[in-house]
Image (cartoon, rainbow, N blue to C red):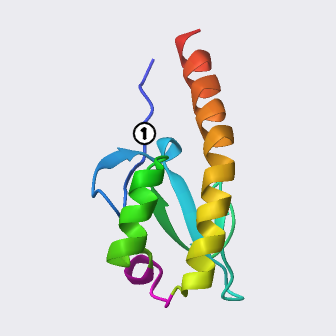
Amino acid sequence: MKQRKIPLRKCVACQEMMPKRDLIRVVKTPEDDILIDLKGKKSGRGAYLCGKVSCFKLAKKSKALDRALKHTVGPDIYDQLEQDFIRVEDEFLASKAEGDDEDES
């Protein structure tokens, strides 16, 4: 059986290439809202981050999200994203572990 191609994306903070499903997507919607997209299906310009809070903080410090999204991300939006990021981190890690279990069977 032919092996499926795994799409790779780069974390905007640590610059590490990883499978797309191992990263969290931050999206700027056409309405200029910036939010976290766990499913990867929302329309708009996306940027990918590792599932680690340290990478989020590095992206905030270096303004990597501003460059990747081609839009100025204000400090209030960073604060909101940080709260969302911490909240979804557990959900993201759980879904990632669930996906790993399915791959093994």
The single residue placed furthest to the top in the displayed view is 105
Magenta stretch: give its range.
Answer: 66-72
Residue at screen point 52% across, 43% down: 21
**From the viewer's perspective, is residue 51 above or below residue 99?**
below
* 99 within the magenta span: no
The single residue placed furthest to the left in the displayed view is 15
Q: Nearer the viewer, residue 2 or 95?
A: 95
Disc 1 residue type (three-letter): Ile
Q: Position of residue 48 (x, y in %)?
A: 46, 60
Dot 1 crowding, Cα within 10 Å, few <14, some 14–19, many 20+ = few
Q: Position of residue 8 (x, y in %)?
A: 38, 48
Q: Is residue 17 left or right of residue 103?
A: left
**From the viewer's perspective, is residue 92 above or below residue 79?**
above
Residue at screen point 36% across, 73% down: 61
Mark 1 secondary-structure assignment = loop
**From the viewer's perspective, is residue 18 above or below residue 29?**
above
Give the residue at mark 1. 6
Q: Position of residue 69 (x, y in %)?
A: 47, 80
